Amino acid sequence: MQSFMQHNPTRLWFGHEQIGQLKQELGNKGKRVLLVYGGGSIKKNRVYNAVLSELEQMEAEVIELSGVEPNPRLTTVHKGIDICRQEKVDFILAVGGGSVIDCVKAISVGVYYNGDVWDIITRKASVEQALPFGTVLTLAATGSEMNNISVITNWEMNEKRGWASPLAYPAFSILDPSYTYSVPLDQTVYGIVDMMSHVLEQYFHRTEHVPMMDRFMESVLLTIMEAAPDLIREPDNFDLRATIMYAGTTAFNGLLSSGTDGGDWASHQIEHGLSAVYDIPHGGGLGIIFPNWMSHCAEEDPSRMKLLAIRVFQVDPSGKSDKAIALEGIAALREFWNSLGAPSRLADYNIDSSRLDELVEKSFMKPQVGSYKIMTRDTVRDILIRSM
Amino acid sequence: MQSFMQHNPTRLWFGHEQIGQLKQELGNKGKRVLLVYGGGSIKKNRVYNAVLSELEQMEAEVIELSGVEPNPRLTTVHKGIDICRQEKVDFILAVGGGSVIDCVKAISVGVYYNGDVWDIITRKASVEQALPFGTVLTLAATGSEMNNISVITNWEMNEKRGWASPLAYPAFSILDPSYTYSVPLDQTVYGIVDMMSHVLEQYFHRTEHVPMMDRFMESVLLTIMEAAPDLIREPDNFDLRATIMYAGTTAFNGLLSSGTDGGDWASHQIEHGLSAVYDIPHGGGLGIIFPNWMSHCAEEDPSRMKLLAIRVFQVDPSGKSDKAIALEGIAALREFWNSLGAPSRLADYNIDSSRLDELVEKSFMKPQVGSYKIMTRDTVRDILIRSM
């Protein structure tokens, strides 16, 4: 086990009608609130009205920024920073999924930075101060509601970059599973693939003697896999939405990598390259890339894939080679995601090999890609070709 | 799933030589530090010197309170409160196991209370303010290092009472597994029984649809059961000590009961009665009471004991009644604890039925005992008789 520090500053309010906590959480902080949301789906369900009603009761001045994109763009972050400065905003409230929250994180740290926030996102500048923000989650997927990580896309440069800061945790997050009833089927599935991928990235670590973390990660995967097929059939089931929503948060709030090296994350880097070029859904891209990354890596060292196959996919190991066990588990993972309706090949998004070189290059936005296996341009190319 | 709020304010520093974090954590807060410890075992290993050396580098004024008892006493809490007031202490540092930490929690809330701190412990008064404190853990058992719970014994009244306050979380806890190398075998075993009992108490909840919490609890139990027998053979193995230490913290830091009704806790109430009268080790008492509580309850409703038997003790359910499966699991739990060297009957502590009425009465320090099954004096008596 490695040394670690465990502490998550986000207060998580989970359950039916927890929106009532908004007043207490904002208290005297939020007198001029920037309300940030996406394409307006929160106006079709009751979330927008519920939030506004709470803010009105507090007599907060509300300024709105809507239209945050599914892969949130630097231009939108700039817009938010300008509004915060002009309107003297003292609190930002993200209402939406991971994209909205990621966008708000970048606005929050950009407000006090004397330069282009892209410097922070590309790690050229560090964060000294941030405007406080909270979230009301409407999509179970990224875990951004309880971590300090954000991903922003710069379309001028075709770059999608992840960044983090100790100052980028939400002060609070309100998770009411019923707010996710109206999430369309495809987005629900992408969310499930995304949260499972977060667990899998962390599962592919190289740290010995972290048995509880391994079991915790397996628990999250097993729980999601048990609930997901039922949820697809019953999208308005509170308990199933609750299970998936809490799993998504737990999958990526720091708990699961306590004491480990943090995991691999090459599949995420490769997917970031993909959706920087083609703007496909993150969960859709991951569902295609991840099993191919696994089968690529299992050729050299199938040990962790084998453990996963036995403990999560109930593969019977008797009389089989490690690699055969691993491949059986990988096939079961792919089959599970496909059974939910996730795409299995890049061709499903009309992506062929015509921009392969560019995709490889866009995967290398960080100096090192992967840690379970350190990727080269050749190995990334192999994984992308397997995914075509 | 029930609604819940998830947030733990304690900063947990885990790993080899994390004592170096003390300076950063105390910062400008700790200029006059009350150092609290137990029977002096920290002077026999290197912990006392390591802590003092850090405090000296900070030029902190150090006042000592030693001799905190294994079941910490109200008289010692009073002594600590007096010292804090007289010496104008601004920070308390607990160095020890759960007893020392529990004692410090009571001192911390008692300093600012204008009356006997026993009022707070018996819930007649509420906590308005607390002196900040941190911990350096030397015994893996109670989980007190990352929760807001404390248990104090009033020997004048033969009462052992648990209490909690939102202000009773440690500001930080430093967990270096090597600090537990010198813990004697019996105390190591009692600690293991204690932490497993914390998980089991929470496992016996009545909340539907909390599949991830159930799996997390099973994960903690499986991890402990895998590591414990090896640790008994190799008490100086860092990784095994680390696994058990982290399991003890996770067993009782709030995570495992997120969204549940919190679990049963009758076995703890009955054990508190036992050790209020006989001053036996808490873990020793629990190891005797808990399986008998389980077999008592399984007669009416074996559902949770059955799940535990199958998932944690790998009992093959085929062709067996629910009750038979449950009892097989309970027998396996008892056998596991006995195999580590924990006592199996109250007779092992020379406790017979001569003070049975008093033991029953002392179990009812709270208006309700148990929630999976609400206890009466008759059912507690039955469990105690089974335990003789």
Image: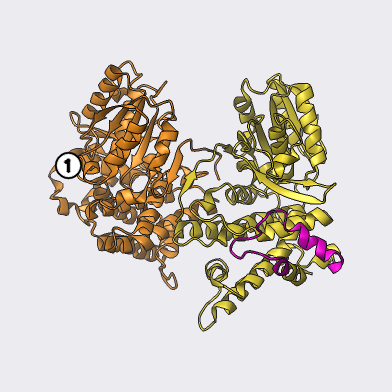
Chain colours: A orange, B yellow
Residue at the spot x=73%, y=40% of the render?
B119
Q: Is residue A328 left or right of residue A5?
A: left
Q: Residues within 10 Å of mark 1 (few under 14, many from 20)?
A: some
Q: Is residue B184 left or right of residue B168?
A: right
Q: Is residue A39 left or right of residue A268?
A: left
In the image, farthest residue toward the top: A114
Q: Can residue A125 be seen in the rendering of this structure? A: yes
User: Where residue B365 sits: x, y (%)?
Assistant: 72, 54
Residue A338, image quadrant: bottom left
Residue at the spot x=31%, y=60% of the render?
A231
User: Where residue A335 sits: x, y (%)?
Assistant: 28, 63
Q: Total of numbered circles in the picture? A: 1
In the image, farthest residue toward the bottom: B319
Secondary structure at badge 1 equals: helix
Relative to the observer, which residue lies in front, B161 or B123?
B123
Chain for numbered disc 1: A
Residue B138, image quadrant: top right
Relative to the observer, which residue lies in front, A184 or B192?
A184
User: Where residue B211 sits: x, y (%)?
Assistant: 45, 60
Q: Amino acid at mark 1?
A: Tyr
Identify whether A195 is placed above or below B346.
above
Identify whether A229 is placed above or below B123.
below
Instruction: Magenta stretch: give its range.
Output: B352-380
Q: Can residue B226 be seen in the rendering of this structure? A: no
Asked whether B369 falls inside the magenta stretch, the response is: yes
Relative to the observer, which residue lies in front, A81 or B360?
B360
Q: Which residue is tagged 1?
A: A278
Asked whether A208 falls inside the magenta stretch, the response is: no
User: Where residue B161 sits: x, y (%)?
Assistant: 73, 49
Residue B60, image quadrant: top right
